[in-house]
Image (cartoon, rainbow, N blue to C red):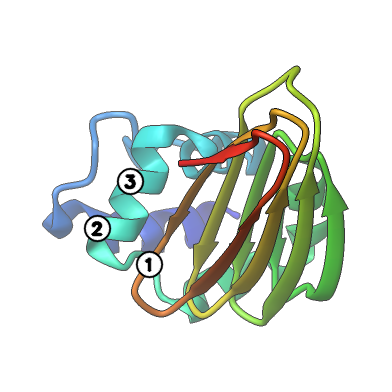
Amino acid sequence: MEEIIRKIFQQAKPLGSCKMFTGDERTVEDIIKLFTDPQGIEFCIKKNFPDISTYRAFEPWFEEGRKHGIYIDAGAISLKNPKLALLIGNTAATITCDTVEDLHRVVALQGAKCNVIACNWAVVRVRKDDNSTIIKSVHNNAIIL
């Protein structure tokens, strides 16, 4: 894990990585926190970072990532009311949001595809990079930002 983190840090530093990423992160949880933080997501989108091969290096920890809403090369999936869905690579998701308890965040990176269906006053914040696709469908007073 430390070798992967070191590689990511070496790639991110010249791009102006945020101060949150020090290169001293040691656990999967440390990296998950960086990649799910709004600043981390913004950095990944703006800098097209990291590349898909770097994300795939985390394959041994894909299951742990899914517990936190990160789906890398997950294929066709359906999610209902995720607080966060970070979709990466070969992932095609249908996401239905119909609750108002949380702001739902959906992010598509590195070629991921997503169909977001929002209804019943749900509020969904979507973000994507230039290589990804998000199709939005809004019903019954819901909002997709």
Q: Which image quarter holds the N terminus?
A: bottom right
Q: Position of residue 45 (x, y in %)?
A: 33, 58
Q: Quadrant of the C terminus?
A: top left
Q: Cα distance, mark 2 to mark 1?
A: 8 Å
- The mark that comes first in sequence, 3 or 1, is 3
Name the secondary structure under disc 3: helix
Residue at label 2?
Answer: 46
Nearest the viewer among 25 and 107 is: 107
Q: Which mark is residue 129?
A: 1
In the image, is residue 14 above or below residue 32? below
- In the drawing, does residue 115 fall left or right of residue 25? right
Q: Is residue 109 left or right of residue 9?
A: right
Q: Secondary structure at mark 1?
A: loop
Residue 112 x %, y % = 58, 75
User: Which amino acid, by three-letter code, is at mark 3?
Assistant: Glu
Q: Horizontal placement of 11 versus 116: left or right?
A: left
**Contact, mark 3 vs mark 2 (Cβ under 8 Å):** yes
Identified at 70% across, 28% down, the residue is: 121
Q: CA distance from mark 3 to mark 2?
A: 6 Å
Q: Earlier in the sequence, mark 2 or mark 1?
A: 2
